[in-house]
Amino acid sequence: MTRADDTAALLRVLIHERFANRIALVSAFGAESAVLLHMTAAIDPALPVIFLDTEKLFPETLAYRDRLAARLGLRDLRVARPDPVTAMAADPVQDPDGCCAARKTGPLDAALAPFDAWISGRKRFQGGDRSALEAVEFGADWRIKINPLAGWSAADIAAYFDHFDLPPHPLVARGFRSIGCAPCTRAVRADEDPRAGRWDGLAKTECGIHRSPAFRDKVPA
């Protein structure tokens, strides 16, 4: 578990020293989320964990969130929700970018307002724009994003799940390897990239929360 030990050591410094009381973990409670949630909970179960409830999620994701939060003893789970009027005006099929802006990027920007840095669970092996993912990113809003699992492999993730007997997301057994909102997510084949089931048939590959606010103004999510 050397890679895990190194990652945990980095997180401990970030949470308790470098950004003490000024950092949060953003988690979708998806297919691989239990690794980072377990790791950070072991360091500080009171670390703020921000969960975006887009109100379009699979019921299995909400149930998994509650199960993991209880098991890991998370003491500061913050649920960010969209403005109902704005969200109703954005259709996930007709306007997926607008829907993501209303249900994800806007609520997340508001939830991150008290923090100087945040922790993301993205990895390079997920493919697409994430293939060249840096461990640390700097946003135009001066907020720092840390991707401590950037260099982890799928095997590393699986080994961590096994070592700590972490429960899988219930949709993983049905072929979902990346889990977002129900209207925009499908199961994937074994030969596809983990995120191939997100926004299937569209050029869109990211919801937009991993782009800085200034960048979002210039490039479609």
Image: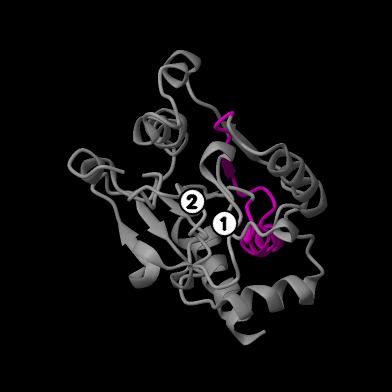
Residue 208 location (% of width, % of height):
36, 44
User: Which is more N-terminal, label 1 or label 2?
Assistant: 1
Q: Is residue 125 above or below residue 62?
A: below
Q: Compared with residue 120, is residue 183 higher up or lower down, i.e. above or below?
A: above
> Viewed as shown, does residue 24 lie left or right of 161?
left
Q: Quadrant of the C terminus?
A: top left
Residue 177 position in % (x across, y down)? 61, 60
Residue 143 lies, in percent from the top left, at 33, 49
Q: Is residue 165 left or right of residue 87?
A: right
Residue 86 image offset from top left, x and y in percent: 41, 18
Q: Amino acid at mark 1?
A: Ser
104 within the magenta span? no
Where residue 141 sits, quadrant-wise, is top left
Residue to which mark 2 is pinned? 198
Residues drawn in magenta: 30-55
* Secondary structure of residue under mark 1: loop
In the picture, the quarter occupied by the N terminus is: bottom right
Q: Amino acid at mark 2?
A: Arg
Residue 31 in the magenta stretch? The answer is yes
Residue extending farthest bottom: 2
Instruction: Name the residue rendered at 64%, 58% in the picture.
Output: 31
**Residue 178, disc:** 1
* Label 2 residue SS: loop
Q: Nearer the viewer, residue 126 or 185?
A: 185
Mark 2–mark 1 CB contact (< 8 Å)? yes
